[in-house]
């Protein structure tokens, strides 16, 4: 199921009703601002598949590394996520606030860059966090679409977990895609809720993946 505008409005109402002091006023206003923008752009969709790898491929070299800190202000079927990205191709760190609806292969998504001061304040309110390194590879065979592959190597309690993700323009395109052999041995986990980042952040270890 994908979230309707009525459901987004309900989440806005819920967030507005948080008791005074739960989140500082200025951060609450910023969060609500972005939720309302998501309401206006509810038709934005994320369509992606993901696979678990045995290890990080050798072509994911240090010069391509991006460091990602990710936290959730609230999670569940509807999530509000913070992300800080630093490293390759970024220069100074950039910060994002993202809202996502429910789903596996496809789901609503809205994202916007936010200033560091807003990120820092909201980060203190994150209920779950995780850290990972990302390596982005663009590749395609002759006569095929050049695709972006994002290889994530998780840290701390999730160390040893490596995931590759690939996004698509349509569900039909996603369903027809065959992961190329050069990626290495992989097991698809697109529809396994245990591999959602919010679940990984919540549990903080690999025990639930055994």
Image: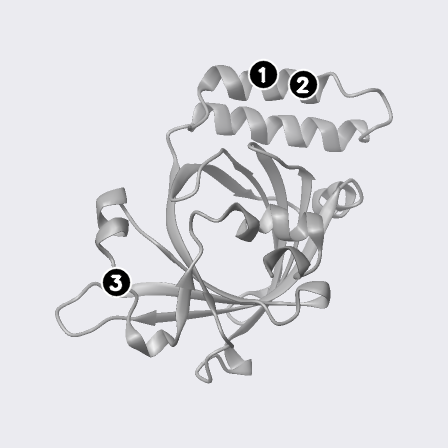
Q: Nearer the viewer, residue 130 or 121?
A: 130
| Crowd class of label 1 (few under 14; some 14 to 19; many from 20; radius 10 Å) | few
Which residue is tagged 1? 10
Q: Nearer the viewer, residue 149 or 185?
A: 185
Q: Position of residue 83 (x, y in %)?
A: 62, 51
Which residue is tagged 2? 14
Q: Position of residue 135 (x, y in %)?
A: 49, 71
What separation in Å lies between label 1 and label 2 (alpha carbons)?
6 Å
Q: Which mark is residue 29?
A: none
Name the residue at 66% across, 31% down: 31
Verify CB contact (< 8 Å) between mark 2 and mark 3: no
What separation in Å lies between label 2 and label 3 (alpha carbons)?
41 Å
Which label's residue is closer to the chain start, 1 or 3? 1
Closer to the camera: disc 2 or disc 3? 3
- For the view shown, which residue lies furthest in the left direction? 143
- Say above or below: 79 vs 198: above
Q: Quadrant of the C terminus?
A: bottom right
Asked whether residue 203 appears in the rendered view, the answer is yes
Q: Nearer the viewer, residue 181 or 88?
A: 181
- For the view shown, which residue lies furthest in the front direction? 210
- Say above or below: 197 vs 28: below
Verify CB contact (< 8 Å) between mark 1 and mark 2: yes
What separation in Å lies between label 1 and label 3 (alpha carbons)?
39 Å
Which residue is tagged 3? 178
Q: Quadrant of the N terminus?
A: top left
Q: Position of residue 39 (x, y in %)?
A: 49, 24
Name the residue at 59% across, 36% down: 79
């Amino acid at each position: 199921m994908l979230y309707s505008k009525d459901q987004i409005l309900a989440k806005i109402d819920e967030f507005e009703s948080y008791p005074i002091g739960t989140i500082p006023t200025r951060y609450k206003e910023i969060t609500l601002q972005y939720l309302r923008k998501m309401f206006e752009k509810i038709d934005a969709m994320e369509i992606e598949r993901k696979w678990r790898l045995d290890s990080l491929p050798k072509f994911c070299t240090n010069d391509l590394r991006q460091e990602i800190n990710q936290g959730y202000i609230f999670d569940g079927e509807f999530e509000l996520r913070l992300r800080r990205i630093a490293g390759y191709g970024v220069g100074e760190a950039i910060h994002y606030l993202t809202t996502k609806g429910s789903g596996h292969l496809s789901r609503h998504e809205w994202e916007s860059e936010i200033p560091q001061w807003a990120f820092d304040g909201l980060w203190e309110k994150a209920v779950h966090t995780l850290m990972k390194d990302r390596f982005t590879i663009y590749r395609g065979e002759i006569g095929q679409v050049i695709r972006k592959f994002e290889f994530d190597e998780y840290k701390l309690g999730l160390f040893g977990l490596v995931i590759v993700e690939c996004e698509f323009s349509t569900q039909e395109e996603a369903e027809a895609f065959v992961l190329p052999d050069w990626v290495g041995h992989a097991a698809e986990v697109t529809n396994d809720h245990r591999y959602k980042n919010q679940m990984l952040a919540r549990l903080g270890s690999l025990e639930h993946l055994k």
